[in-house]
Amino acid sequence: MGKPRLRHLIRRVRPDDEVVVSALYREYHRPLLAFVIRLTAGDRQWAEDVVQETMIRAWRSAETLDRDSVSLMPWLATVARRIVIDDRRRRDARPQESGDGALESMPVPDEMEGMLRQVVVSEALKALSPAHREILNETILRDRSVNDAAEALGIPVGTVKSRVYYAVRALRIALEERGVTA
């Protein structure tokens, strides 16, 4: 397709007219790609992306393009060069991404032991009497003082102290039965 035909297409362009984009692509894709490959230091993938973005911008600006120009290549080259410059600035503005290589070799703490410990403690707590579970829940799990636990449970402070003592002893025995030592 010759340049006069392209100028004719641009004259009748509408923002959704794909014929113009096809004509622009057929006529300017190769020379523009060759130009952009030099701008991107031989990075063909990046160059293809830049050419595609340039064509999209040409399509969006088709109504404002110079219809009497012999070639649109200078305009396309300027747009492509600005896209490459913007891409470089964007890449320089954020830290380089690293691959998964370093993360794969990084030691990760094994959380299985902690999970097993939680299960064993949970089972040991279930083996306690309801009064012992209740007092450990108030004092240890909810981190309440003996006085606060006594008030919350409505029992004397001395009762809380003795229940905590016997509940901890019972829990220690229940844990030892499950193979947990100190």
Image (cartoon, rainbow, N blue to C red):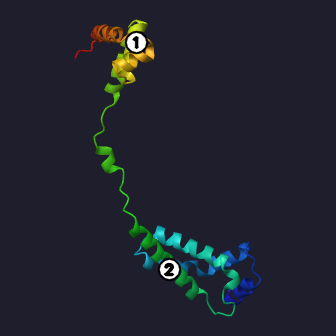
Give the Cα distance between marks 1 and 2.
Answer: 70 Å
Residue 58 in picture, x, y percent from top left: 63, 78
Residue 11 in picture, x, y percent from top left: 75, 86
Residue drawn at point x = 67 percent, y = 88 percent: 3
Residue 76, placed above or below residue 53? below
Determine which of the numbered discs, if any, sits on residue 47 in the image.
Answer: none
Q: Quadrant of the N terminus?
A: bottom right
Label 2: state its secondary structure: helix
Residue drawn at point x = 32 percent, y = 50 percent: 101
Residue 119 shows in this picture: no
Q: Is residue 89 left or right of residue 110?
A: right
The quadrant in which residue 107 appears is top left
Q: Is residue 172 left or right of residue 38?
A: left
Q: Which residue is mark 1?
A: 133
Residue 72 in picture, x, y percent from top left: 61, 87
Q: Amino acid at mark 2?
A: Arg
- Dot 2 alpha-carbon crowd within 10 angstroms: few under 14, some 14 to 19, many 20 or more: some
Residue 105, placed above or below residue 182? below
Q: Amino acid at mark 1?
A: Arg
Residue nearest the viewer, comparing 146 with 87: 146
Residue 3, placed above or below residue 125? below
Residue nearest the viewer, comparing 15 with 1: 15
Q: Quadrant of the C terminus?
A: top left
Q: Which residue is mark 2?
A: 82
Residue 173 shows in this picture: yes
Q: Earlier in the sequence, mark 1 or mark 2?
A: 2
Residue nearest the viewer, comparing 20 with 175: 175
Q: Residue furthest left?
A: 182
